[in-house]
Image (cartoon, rainbow, N blue to C red):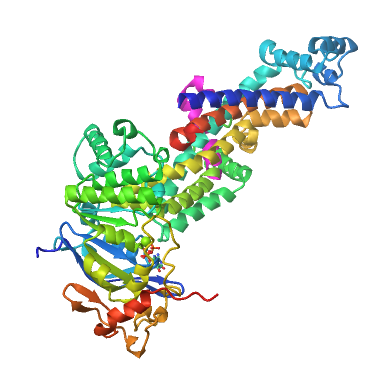
Amino acid sequence: MWRFAGKRALAALLVLFAISVLVFLIFFATPGIDPAARIAGRNASQETLTQVRASFGFDRPIWVQYGLMMQHLFINRDLTSFVNRGSQVIPQVMQAIPVTLSLVFGAALIWVVLALIMGVAATAARGTVIDPLILVIGVIGVSLPVFWLGEVVNLVTQSRLHDTVFAWVPQLGYVPLTDGVGPWALHLLFPWLTLAVLYAGIYARVLRSEMVASMNEDYVRMARAKGIGETRVLIRHSLRTSMISIVSLFGLDFGALIGGAALLTEVVFGLQGVGKLTYDSLQNFDLPVILACVLYASFFVVLANFIVDLLYAWLDPRVRHV
Amino acid sequence: MSEPLLDVRDLRVSFRTRTGVVTAVDGISFTVGPGDVVGLVGESGSGKSVSMLSVLGLIDNPNCVIEGQALFKGRDLLTMSDDELRAVRGQEIAMIFQDPMTALTPVYTAGWHISEQIRAHEKVSKKAALARAVQLLDAVGIPNAADRVNSYPHEFSGGMRQRVVIAMALSCNPSLLIADEPTTALDVTIQAQILELLKSLQSEFGSSIVLITHDMGVVSQMSDRVMVMYGGRLAEAGPRREVMRNPLHPYTWGLMASIPPTDGTRVARLAAIPGAPISPGDPDRDHCLFSARCRFVSDACRPQPELVEHIPGHFDSCVLPFADRVELRRQAMTPLEVAP
Ligand SMILES: Nc1ncnc2c1ncn2[C@@H]1O[C@H](COP(=O)(O)OP(=O)(O)OP(=O)(O)O)[C@@H](O)[C@H]1O
Ligand SMILES: [Mg+2]
């Protein structure tokens, strides 16, 4: 297991390196754009341009440029925004990351737990009306557009019923975890639920079909032949093996959400997360911010994948030896 | 004779399907005595697995209808509650399936599987169960049992995995073991080893075995009694010696002709019987089901012939005159000339 983790970690580092090179090449080795102008900021003076050229080595070989860029990004952390001159990029990103992480982690926890409950219940109730009913509820959740659902939730909790039932719902926005777990969770509760509804149905569906298929496997029949109770067969044999396919799905979705795919939820609920930051920077081609967002986001995506890989190996002993 | 361990009476199993009712088992009766090894032979689809699975309530299909009686130590398994049945499964009647590659849950170790089996029926600590797992693995001939108890199924070869399954099946000392083609998925030398193992364990623990197979060779090597199934019915049943030396039913003749040569070369499965097995969904069943493939078919094959005890203990369901059987068998079992 440790060797497996070591190998995976090494692979993750390589992937990070490859991403950074690729992103760098796309933005700085593409003919036709003057990277110095993009970094120096809007309407920069000739002087600043020359200084940026020297500091980023744009007149030197490409690998030196890459090295200097990484130094500015990760060591000096002094890259400034193209649009808002003087505002440093890295602190912006560092502020956005906890917001997105909080949103996605919480939502993921909720949707996984929901999916497990729904999937197991549907499998246990297969052959009755409860099974398709659970799945239909899941599909309805999946097909609601997130911005619409979010707006409806806001309408209800922030205005229509805010004076009565939902008086306890705080204003939109993010409160850091350092202000206390209670306020943090309360601010994020509806964003979590909204995002979770989007995924729980799909996960429940996949889990249910995996579990129902495994109920016909030899090992489930063998488990029954051993005289084990049906609940234990369902949980310890069928669910346990079916979780493996959920985990690979989870790795993809979780990584994408952390990397910015939670944009719509962030916008609807007024959360300044990575998705929102990336979107804004793309709007006005703010190259330094884009660069920082992409690289920092990719770090978390790779980290999430690494954790999922470990989870995978922990769940499935066959993987550990590959 | 002592009271039988398992006494199956007029067992019928059918499935309601979209295309009609499929009769998988069509009124079979048999007994298994204490310490008996009974071979259940027949081609694919003859209802061997379904008959034994239905007895243990292991057919997980709401469209399955099971009728008849299956008395185990005097109690009818078919009318037991789920809880009562669960207490019997694994503890009193254990089962081994055909494919050892898929019979173990891939995410658990051999020791986990065995201790789960033990702890399902006995109140023992995990540690004690695991210690017993090591002994059992050792008893079924797994080298380094103390280490291998922590191995996962994919770390064993097919033959070793079947040994793990056997160790698991025997861990509660069941009085009846149902082995559903335990060696079909294994290659010939491993097959022999596993059969040898079953035999020695059987004589050591004294449990009865129902051995399901499509291979007459395996039956002749292992069992005390033989039951030949065709189309969900018994074609012939009797003591092994009797059936092997003096088979009475034309279907059995076909099966006998298909025993592979003892030098180990493998031949195509049951190549000797021409024609395809009957379809269990065919509603016309009031005749000898084998007649469509039988060289000696006549009008007497309809309606369905009874199972008759021509020789004490030796039953068959063929209408051919008993006196002529030896001569007809000689004709049937000399190979036909193959047209060029
Ligand atoms: N769930 C089911 N639905 C419909 N028909 C079924 C079902 N299960 C089994 N059958 C039918 O019952 C018949 C007997 O099947 P069974 O598995 O007992 O055969 P078998 O003698 O064990 O054959 P094999 O040597 O291939 O294992 C088959 O013809 C099959 O079509
Ligand atoms: Mg079978």
Tell me, yes or no, if residue B318 can be seen here: no
x then y, percent, for residue A126:
41, 57
Q: Residue at 75%, 30% (x, y): give it.
A: A282
- Mark yes or no: residue B319 visible: yes
Q: Is residue B139 above or below residue B293?
A: above
Q: Position of residue B214 (x, y in %)?
A: 36, 63
Which one is in front, B39 or A87?
Answer: B39
Foreground: A83 or B2? B2
- Is residue A180 highlighted in magenta? yes
Residue B24: image location, x then y, percent: 36, 70
**As drawn, A198 above or below B76:** above
Question: Does A273 lie within the magenta span?
Answer: no
Total label count?
0
Magenta range is A176-198
Q: Residue furthest right?
A: A46
Q: Residue at x 80, y 23 (%)?
A: A28
Left or right of B147, for residue B199: left
* Picture quadrant of ligand 1: bottom left
Work out whether A37 lies above or below B51. above
Residue at 42%, 75% in the rendered image: B278
Q: Farthest residue in the bottom direction?
A: B299
Which quarter of the figure is the N terminus of chain A placed in?
A: top left
- Going by the image, does A219 lie left or right of A90? left
User: In the image shown, does A212 or B288 lie closer to the viewer?
Assistant: B288
- Residue at image x 35%, y 62%? B215
Mostly what secondary structure, the magenta segment?
helix
**x and y, in percent, of residue A107 in the image:** 52, 36
